Amino acid sequence: MAPATTLRVADSAIFVCDIQEKFRNAIHEFDKVILTSRKVLRAAAILDIPVVVTTQNRARLGDTVPELSSLYAADPASSGGDKKAKLIIDADKTLFSMWTPEVKKAFAAESAPTTAVIVGIESHICVTQTALDMLAAGYRVYVIADGVSSSNREEVPVALARLRAAGATVTTSESWMYETMGDSSIPAFRNIISLVKDTSADTKVALSSLLSSKI
């Protein structure tokens, strides 16, 4: 059998929602959201999945945390060092939804991705409104349950239940990676396996810290 040449879930983009400095001490298990988001961005670099990043009122709430911003670049080929994910746009916003006019324009120009994969905060506000807007616009939406949170943890399972009912796929980071590949014969498989092994401890702590309040 010939090796697979395409992903099972093609034409995706990663949406990194408002993971900013000012939220470090305000969001439930914020550090675990970062761990999962790092893994997702590293997978995006391996699988050539582009990235959309937003901040909410950056002047007041700060930049995207450096643990994440170091993993993507507008021109990864010239960034040097380890491979980075390709950045479609890094946009500041006042809307709660990431699906702003500026993001729509940039996203549509990027070979028309049809699937959004969301990590970030807050689950019941910006993540929810982004997912609902993109579902309404006809996109397939994955919400990574071990990569989202809120200031009050009790908000999270309510938000995820609502998004499931609306048609979003709520799943885990590892499940998403394997579903995106779909076939162990694709060239990227070995690198993804290495990533899974490298982040296994992070995965366990993120799942135990975050999903216990969501499922």
Image (spheres, rainbow, N blue to C red):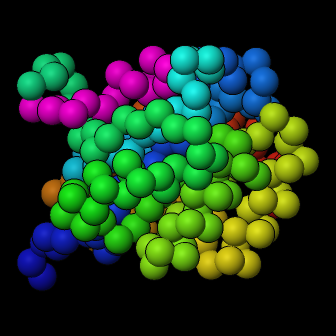
Q: Position of residue 129 (x, y in %)?
A: 64, 58
Q: Quadrant of residue 42?
A: top left
Q: Quadrant of the C terminus?
A: bottom right
Q: Is residue 43 above or below residue 151?
A: below
Q: Residue at the location (70% across, 42% down)?
A: 122
Question: Magenta residues, as a range?
Answer: 63-77
Q: Nearer the viewer, residue 163 or 180?
A: 163
Q: Residue at the location (49% across, 56% down)?
A: 99
Q: Quadrant of the N terminus?
A: bottom left
Residue 128 falls left or right of residue 78? right
Q: Quadrant of residue 84?
A: top left
Residue 57 falls left or right of residue 154? left
Q: Is residue 70 within the magenta segment? A: yes
Q: Is residue 1 above or below residue 108?
A: below
Q: Position of residue 174 (x, y in %)?
A: 51, 54
Q: Quadrant of residue 208?
A: top right
Q: Residue at the location (21% across, 59% down)?
A: 109
Residue 75 falls left or right of residue 95? left
